[in-house]
Amino acid sequence: MTKRHALLLFFLPLLTGLAKTKDPRDLEFPTRLEFTPHQVDYHTLSNGIEVFFVEDHEVPLTDIHFFIKAGENRIPGEYAGLAEICAYLITEGGSRTVPKRVFEDSLKNFGASFYGYSGTDEASFTLHLLSKHIPELLPMVVEAIRQPALPENQLAVNKGQYLIGYQSRNSEPSSVASRIFKKLIYGKNSPDVRETTPENLAKITLEKIAEFHKANYRPEHMMIGVAGDFEPKVMLDLLERYLGNWENPSENPWEEIPTYLDPAPGGVYYVHWPEAVQSNVRMGYEGIYRDAPDYPASRLFVEIYGGSWGSRLIKQVRVEKGYAYVAYGVLSSGFTEPGTFRILTSTKTETTVDAIQLILEITRDMKTKGVTEDELRFSKTSWLASFPAYYAEPEQVLFDRMRYAKYDFPLDFWDKLPDKIEPLEVTDVNAFASRFIETEKLVILVLGDSTAFHGSLSDIGEVTIIDPEEY
Amino acid sequence: MKQLARFLFFTLLLPLITGASTYAELEERVVEHELENGMRFLIFERHDAPLVSMVISVKAGAANEVTNKTGVAHFLEHLAFKGTKNLGTTDYDAEKDALAELDKTFEAWFQASQAGAESAVLDRLYADFIEKQDEAFSYIVEGEIGKLYEGNGGTSVNAATSYDYTTYQVTLPSNRFKLWCAVESDRMANPVFRELYRERNVILEERRKGTDNSPTGLFWEEFNCAAYKAHPYGRPIIGHYSDMENLSRETVRDFYETFYVPQHMTAGIAGDVNAEEIIPLLDAYFGRIQTKPDPPEIITTEPEQPGIRRVEVKLAKTPITVVKFLTVPRAHPDEIPLDLLATILGGGQTSRLHRALVEKRKLATYVSAYHPTRRHGGYFQVYARPVEGVTPGELEVAVLEELRKIKDNPVNTSELEAARARIQIGIFDAFSNNLRLARNLALADQQPDGWRNTFRRLEQASLITPDDLTDVAGRYLDFDKRTVGLMEVTDD
């Protein structure tokens, strides 16, 4: 090689401006990335409503969220659906001072949206708008929440939607499987899973909705979160002006009903779906509490078991066996009640029994054989490195702080989790698996056509037949 | 009239819209970079969290497939996660030979089964196939791409196939940007379609889940097929079952070689990176992708529809009415008037159709209208669900009655302004998170009108008049050229 060639080779990368490429496996990064999540500011209105602000001035939009502890868990069974219908009437019905049509048109003319729904333990409403329209629209939606018009014609529209939804409830096999599974896990009458039947609809009157609203939409039940491009002082003044004078009513709030009412015992539950080419399988039982001492270990357990692309369920059920497109396991944790442990897959009719047997084997192995050092290392690195994604957007930080405040948890609960995850060892995760996994408790729901199964469900356990019309 | 509207936009309306000037600022922040091989990058810096999202869009999708090979674009997307000549293997040179042997044994078994060979022969050939498959598996490092991402805190690791595009996405901690460069440049340049036969079972399960075992999935497939006589937009993206069963490594490779060319790739990058610092990395890593000839364009155009097409099925207890009119491709001058028309007709609770059919006439529980556009053509569609006691066919008649009203009576200015306000918020909404922004930028870049036009849509909409909407309603909502889908309730 001549000197000139050697020089050329030496300078070539500089001349072309190219960085050096590396094999991705040779790249090394620090696992944890220190950072400060978006700042959330806390305020309290004069009547005690807690307010959470997170500013983000990139685009001129603001989201104002109202959370009210007025969910389905306060509704007696005969009125199932009332809390949700109430939330829809608030978003679609206007207020006592602004009629429905004017209300809707005001939002429409500014391109804004106002939507709401009711979950198990709270109703939530969001106003999404260009920041400059806050002064016009915020008072209007606050008024709808405090003093909804509850128009009769809107109730009729909502009832019609529920009715057609109920009549078509047994159309989509995957939806049917999910509905029945939840009823088995929580109990048929749990507020989390009840359906709104034609009988319930007949009993849900405007008077009953107004009664519910008056007793349960109250300042002590409300939290407000604001994210986006707003001026905090101006926003706080507006909220104080339109909500600070709201007093708690003299009526008591309606009693809360527990989510877990009457869970079904472990076993196989079968829904016959003639000529199904694929079986829908759901498995699970009661989950854990967020403040359980082994909650951090449970996070790694679920990553290894079924919560990531590299998990055992995905690897064995989907990749290696090709049994399913979807196969995952999740373990949720509740604040006041346990979350749920759920496994979901769907597989062609012929491989139904084999797929369930494989999932059971994977689940048993988690308990009896435990996890490996490699799995622990991988799941821990993955969890810790992905931590910033939990706080990627301002609203994620806002919702996190509000969630923990709502249940009187330390507001930095999640921030402290990495320090609890980092020192975990194989023994910690195995101890959790050993305590938590009880395959005999698994409710195994199969919706499919057993006449074409290869093998029999009775090889898995005693089979209870379920009629979807009755469940 | 249009000149007057333009004048009004800039002199009167613009100062009232704080976002109008912000669009320019946002547009200004997008850094555009193109490699010598033609691959493009759009970078948007945002430093409020140590994360960065990347989406690569390849201008290739199900519309580029041919008969017998439907589903190959989507299958390729799955197999792209199986690795490269470097990733996912312990010894590619040896594995390559094993894969060739494997394909031969599969072909032998397949041909014999097609020819009706005796079961003993088939069993022997199948055993050969399994043996060769096991040998090929012995070289695999399973899921290495996914593990590299997840092990480094990657989230939203996924991919998607549409008619016109295939996208690959991930969000990473921003200090791992180089990892993305290393993995994706290798994946785009050197994919190896290993684990093909068992992954084929996975996509067949995906089809069963979304279509064959789903009454509404089946209905939509039937309806969509009916709307196109010639254009590949009428085929299912996931593919026909019989084609999917037979997709071979050769078919996948041919599709890749033809359509995965760097000049048809754009990456959207949004998050905590410094454009100046990452451009040398992009040059070094993605510059390695070899230039290839331009892929063939789709020349099939959908002929004028000579009459009404109807699909009526009884598959479940979910009554549905859909009415579809084929319209224009993206960036056509009539696109935005049709978008505005769809918003006015069926964009939510305040729309004309909702107020007429749900609230006033009480015939529907839900109704919406929308106007999606693709590279080779769009469609204007009304979707409605009837109330109890009304059949999907009766609701179709009512939908047409309401459509006729908008053809005969112009929309008013306030309706038009409200629809424009929706566009305004929609542009800002695109910036709501890094991943969404990265995807929007990558896809917008591959539209005929380019990514910058995303920021011009409000300005374009401001030039549209009520008469323009009446005009497009008259020309495109031609009842004699509609495709109707009715999902009737089953009898039992």
Image (cartoon, rainbow, N blue to C red):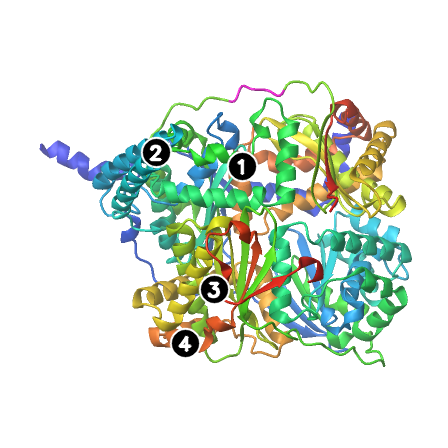
Prevailing secondary structure class for the magenta stretch in the rendered image: loop
| Residue marked by disc 1 | B162
What is the C-alpha distance between the residues marked 1 and 3? 40 Å
Q: Position of residue A47 (x, y in %)?
A: 77, 78
> The disc labelled 1 sits on which kind of residue?
Ser
A387, above or below B352, in the image: below
Image coordinates for residue A153, horizontal then vertical, percent: 89, 54
Q: Residues within 10 Å of mark 4 (few under 14, many from 20)?
A: some
Identity of the amino acid at label 4? Answer: Ser
Q: Is residue B301 magenta?
A: yes
Q: Which residue is mark 3?
A: A460
Q: Determine the CA span between mark 2 and mark 3.
A: 35 Å
Residue mark closest to the camera, 4 vs 2: 2
Residue at numbered disc 2: B118
- Residue A244 on image: x %, y %: 79, 73
Question: Which label number is shown at residue A434?
Answer: 4
Q: Quadrant of residue A127?
A: bottom right
Q: Are marks 1 and 3 on the same chain?
A: no
Mark 2 on the same chain as mark 3: no
Q: Secondary structure at mark 1?
A: loop
Q: Is there one chain holding both mark 2 and mark 1? A: yes
